[in-house]
């Protein structure tokens, strides 16, 4: 994580009005819907906040599942043959335009992995439904691989994340 940022659960005190990542749907969700989803327990939302209280980015996590048949063969060899596997979904991830290209997105992904590893319900992997090819490429650079049937749906097994980022990154 960037030293001047703290990633914390979305709070009512966070000023979301100035947030702008350049994608209207992600901006609108964060400003208008995220807190409602948290209250309804549909997802959890985490915000990266700098010392001045500006929100540099955010992401959401929710429980989900994937059919084992949607995973590449090389990823299923050591898995139990359950038809459905538990995963943690990164529903949304966005970085404010003022903070882009500074490693904030990477810090958010590592934080999401950490929280997924520490969660009480077991989760085999993190999954993301990328909004476009650029977002998918960002995820692939962080070790995510596409599901068989949907190129913009990618996953990162927790075991792979531990190898990529090391146990110290995901205590």
Image (spheres, helix red, strand yellow):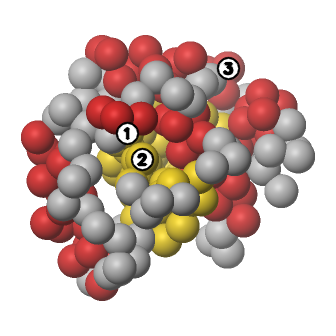
Front disc: 3 or 1: 1
Distance from Cα at disc 3 to Cα at disc 1? 33 Å
Taking depth in this image into account, of 25 and 7 the one nearest to the observer is 7
Q: Secondary structure at mark 1?
A: strand
Residue sitting at x 67%, y 20%? 74
Front disc: 3 or 2: 2
Distance from Cα at disc 3 to Cα at disc 2? 37 Å
Taking depth in this image into account, of 12 and 117 the one nearest to the observer is 12
Up the image or down, 18 lies above or below 34; here it is above
Query: What is the number of callouts on the image?
Result: 3
Q: Secondary structure at mark 2?
A: strand
Give the residue pinned by disc 2.
Answer: 56
Distance from Cα at disc 2 to Cα at disc 1? 6 Å
Name which of mark 2 and mark 1 comes first in the sequence: 2
Residue 37 placement, left or right of 148: left
Give the residue pinned by disc 3.
Answer: 74
Measuring from the top left, give residue 106's x and y in whole percent: 57, 33
Give the residue pinned by disc 1.
Answer: 95
């Amino acid at each position: 994580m960037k030293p001047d940022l703290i990633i914390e659960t979305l709070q009512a005190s966070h000023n979301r009005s100035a947030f702008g990542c350049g994608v209207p749907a992600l901006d609108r969700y964060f400003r208008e819907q995220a807190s409602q989803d948290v209250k309804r327990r549909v997802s959890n939302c985490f915000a990266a906040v700098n010392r001045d209280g500006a929100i540099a980015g955010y992401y959401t996590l929710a429980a989900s599942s994937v059919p084992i048949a949607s995973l590449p063969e090389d990823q299923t060899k050591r898995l139990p043959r359950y038809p459905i596997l538990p995963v943690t979904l990164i529903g949304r991830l966005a970085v404010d335009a003022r903070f882009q290209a500074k490693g904030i997105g990477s810090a958010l992904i590592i934080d999401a992995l950490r929280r997924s590893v520490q969660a009480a319900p077991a989760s085999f992997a993190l999954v993301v439904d990328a909004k476009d090819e650029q977002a998918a490429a960002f995820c692939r650079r962080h070790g995510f691989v596409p599901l068989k049937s949907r190129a913009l749906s990618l996953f990162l097994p927790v075991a792979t994340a531990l190898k990529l980022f090391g146990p110290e990154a995901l205590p």
